[in-house]
Image (tube, helix red, strand yellow):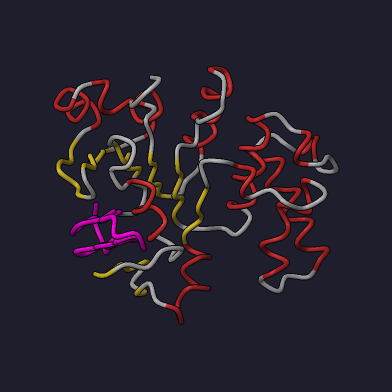
Amino acid sequence: MPGQPLIEVVNLRFRYEDGTVALDGVDFRLFASETVALFGPNGSGKTTFALHLNGLLRGEGEVRVCGLRVEKRNLPAIRRKVGLLFQDPDEQLFMPSVVEDVAFGVLSAGIRPEEAVRRARRILAEVGMEHACERAPYHLSAGEKRRVALAGVLVMEPEVLVLDEPTTYLDPPGQRDLVALLGRLPQAKVIATHDTHLARALASRAVFFEHGRIVAEGAVEELIERFGWDACAGPGR
């Protein structure tokens, strides 16, 4: 893993307004071409941590993305570099048509409308959703929504993808298709997941969260063996 990290987190701490400690001194690095799985039980801090990586949450400590400190003045640049895919794709789909949804981000960045639509159609083709350009997002299946939401992230050409439980709501064929799609993407990835099949297929290493801390890191199989399949896979898996 030569070179400088794409993401560097030092002593990150975060407490919610009700006093709940969500992160308690997290250190983390992500390098180019890596895929890192975030394991841990529900409420262990995985999603809270992920939301810090492009500045949606701000805690104490330091987070740097491609050398830029995550702070207000750097947020536009950081959010171009780090694309975030939420657990529920409906949180990212809000325009009347699929192509408008995918084009929204680049339009907001000042790209001309015709170029934004061209880029959106190209990305939709890459994720296998070109046939749905004019459809309303709420008419799509769960797997189709996930692909469209991912297209909306990819159209911004990020260097890092942060994915929160990306196979949630998908049936087994949909899960396999998404894993194959993610495996073709060149970006470095941070994946908060209970899906051990996804982690085994994609992750070069894993970390295990517990009570807001990273308590272990290593190869995916090593962590599954150490903490147990149930602890990594979570409820219902």
Q: Return the x and y of residue 58 as percentages of the image width and height.
A: 37, 68
Q: Which of 166 and 25 is in front in this view?
A: 25
Q: How many marks?
A: 0
Q: Return the x and y of residue 233 as percentages of the image width and height.
A: 33, 25
Residue 232 against residue 217 in the figure, above or below: above
On the picture, is 68 further left or further right than 157?
left
On the picture, is 192 further left or further right than 26?
right
Q: Return the x and y of residue 60 as percentages of the image width and height.
A: 26, 70
Q: Quadrant of the C terminus?
A: top left
Residue 41 against residue 72 in the figure, above or below: above
Residue 37 against residue 175 in the figure, above or below: below
On the picture, is 146 further left or further right than 165?
right
Where residue 12 sits, quadrant-wise, is bottom left
Q: Is residue 92 magenta?
A: no
Where residue 195 sits, quadrant-wise, is top left
On the picture, is 128 further left or further right than 59?
right
What stretch of residues is rendered in magenta? 1-30
Tell me which residue sits at (81%, 47%) in the image.
97
Q: Return the x and y of residue 139 as percentages of the image width and height.
A: 78, 34
Magenta span: predominant SS is: strand
Where residue 130 sits, quadrant-wise, is top right
Q: Which residue lies furthest to the front in this view?
A: 18
Tell me which residue sits at (18%, 59%) in the image.
25
Tell me which residue sits at (30%, 54%) in the image.
31
Q: Does the magenta stretch include residue 24?
A: yes
Tell me which residue sits at (53%, 17%) in the image.
172
